[in-house]
């Protein structure tokens, strides 16, 4: 068996997130892989998330005692074995059987947090019952406030402590790959045939997901969207429920119905970061939705430093977007993030190898961080700052 990752051959054991991406590409039907992989419009911002991180250079230091290195941190009072959270990924249960459960178990075993998406295939109750570590819950602001209140109540009853409120979906961005693949919009008879043939060419996925286990439903939205195999029904629900009229004042409504920490996900501007703090956010996530919403906005790594400066110590700052290695995590922490959320890395790995794949990717991130700390002469992630970098996101000296 000869696997390829990019232009290079792989052995039987994947060694990086990039390798898992290639395994996922081979295993998944095209439309599902493109759903994971795709971004908004021409995908400029999605590419910038990766490119801008790759231009940052670490500062290598020598002859320092780095025999003991600490990767642990706390986020919102929760101890993490490394500064990583598995980000909410919608439709993940389409990539592998009960994928959210598998990923949550791997996260708990690794000592990191898992965030359940509102549009997961597995319900919050199923995921929470599968692990003894409390999961986080991600929520969209919906027009039907009663439905949203019910979701918050369900999440709290399931033991969730942290609510991640996604705020960059007032209007849904266009993802051209989804249009071309028929994930969105009407399907002609010819397109249905092409899609059916694509599924048939991936028998392992068919056996594991489409034909095995429980029916595919949106576990948290089953009353509203009972069948996860009908994209148009899901798109109609999204269009009817995502609320373009939401304002900062709606955070007070969230506080009325959530007793734990509230995190705002989707902040890219320092002024919005200040507003978030003024309205009581416990943490913010610097995020452009993985480049899946508005194209031609800044990469998250370039947006991070000014937001960290704007927030100061008033709230914890996390970041997502483009994180593909432990070195990327170290760079983000050096620029002021408390932790990183990773989405595509766990989506690739669960699609490729299920729970074992996610566990392996977390070990890969850990090992890469261990090396990065050791060779920058730093022994604790809490000590990371700009001195660990030679060049910052814009290419200037750190």
Image: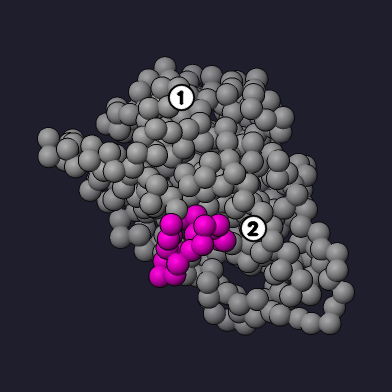
Residue 249 seen in the current view: no
Q: Which residues fall within the magenta stretch?
A: 1-22
Q: Nearer the viewer, residue 80 or 5?
A: 5
Q: Residue at x 56, y 61 (%)?
A: 16
Residue 32, image quadrant: top left
Task: Please name the colour scheme applied to the rendered image.
Answer: one colour
| In the displayed structure image, the side of residue 188 where residue 263 appears, left or right | right
Q: CA distance from mark 1 to mark 2?
A: 30 Å
Q: Nearer the viewer, mark 1 or mark 2?
A: 1
Screen quadrant of the C terminus? bottom right
Q: How many circles with numbers are drawn on the protein?
A: 2
Residue at left offset 45%, top offset 53%? 23
**Residue 341: percent from left, percent from top:** 59, 50
Taking the image as shown, residue 330 lies to the left or right of residue 291, namely right
In this rendering, does residue 189 appear at all? Answer: yes
Q: Quadrant of the N terminus?
A: bottom left
Give residue 254's quadrant in the image: top right
Give coordinates of residue 309: x percent, y percent: 66, 63
Q: Residues within 10 Å of mark 1 (few under 14, many from 20)?
A: few
| CB-based contact (under 8 Å), mark 1 and mark 2 | no
Q: Which mark is residue 53?
A: none
SS type, badge 2:
helix
Q: On the picture, is 89 further left or further right than 387? A: left
Mark 1, residue position: 213
Q: Measured from the top left, where is residue 73 in percent x and y? A: 77, 52
At horizontal 74% and vertical 47% (from top left) the residue drawn is 80
Q: Of callouts 1 and 2, which one flags the residue occurring earlier in the amino acid sequence?
A: 1
Q: Residues within 10 Å of mark 2 (few under 14, many from 20)?
A: many
Give the x, y percent position of residue 173. Answer: 34, 47
In the image: residue 331, left or right of residue 74: left
Q: Is residue 14 magenta?
A: yes
Disc on res. 365:
2
């Amino acid at each position: 068996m000869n696997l390829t990752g990019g232009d290079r051959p792989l052995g039987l054991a994947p060694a990086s997130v990039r390798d898992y991406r290639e395994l996922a590409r081979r295993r998944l039907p095209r439309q599902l892989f493109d759903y994971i992989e795709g971004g908004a419009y021409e995908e400029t911002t999605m590419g910038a998330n990766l490119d801008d991180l790759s231009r940052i250079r670490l500062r290598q230091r020598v002859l320092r005692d780095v025999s003991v290195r600490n990767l642990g941190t706390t986020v919102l009072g929760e101890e993490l074995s490394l500064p990583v959270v598995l980000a909410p990924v919608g439709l993940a249960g389409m990539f592998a059987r009960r994928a959210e459960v598998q990923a949550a178990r791997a996260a708990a075993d690794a000592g990191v947090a898992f965030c359940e998406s509102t549009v997961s295939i597995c319900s919050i109750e199923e995921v929470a019952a599968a692990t003894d570590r409390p999961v986080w819950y991600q929520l969209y602001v919906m027009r039907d406030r009663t439905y949203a209140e019910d979701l918050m109540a369900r999440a709290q009853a399931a033991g969730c402590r942290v609510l991640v409120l996604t705020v960059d979906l007032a209007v849904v961005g266009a993802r051209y790959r989804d249009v071309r693949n028929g994930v969105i919009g009407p399907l002609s008879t010819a397109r249905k045939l092409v899609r059916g043939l694509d599924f048939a060419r991936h028998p392992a996925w068919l056996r594991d997901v489409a034909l095995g286990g429980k029916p595919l439903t949106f576990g948290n939205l089953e009353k509203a969207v009972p069948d996860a195999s009908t994209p148009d029904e899901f798109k109609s629900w999204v269009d009817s429920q995502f609320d373009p009229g939401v304002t900062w004042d709606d955070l007070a409504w969230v506080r009325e119905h959530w007793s734990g920490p509230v995190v705002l996900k989707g902040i890219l501007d320092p002024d919005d970061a200040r507003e978030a703090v003024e309205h009581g956010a416990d943490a913010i996530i610097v995020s452009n939705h993985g480049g899946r919403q508005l194209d031609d906005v800044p990469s998250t790594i370039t947006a991070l430093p000014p937001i960290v400066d704007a927030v100061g110590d008033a709230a914890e700052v996390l970041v997502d977007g483009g994180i593909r290695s432990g070195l990327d995590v170290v760079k983000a922490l050096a620029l002021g993030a408390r932790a990183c959320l990773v989405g595509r890395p766990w989506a690739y790995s669960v699609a490729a190898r299920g729970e074992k794949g996610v566990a392996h990717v977390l070990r890969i991130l850990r090992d890469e961080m261990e090396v990065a700390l050791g060779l920058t002469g730093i022994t604790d992630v809490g000590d990371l700052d700009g001195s660990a970098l030679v060049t910052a996101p814009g290419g200037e000296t750190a």
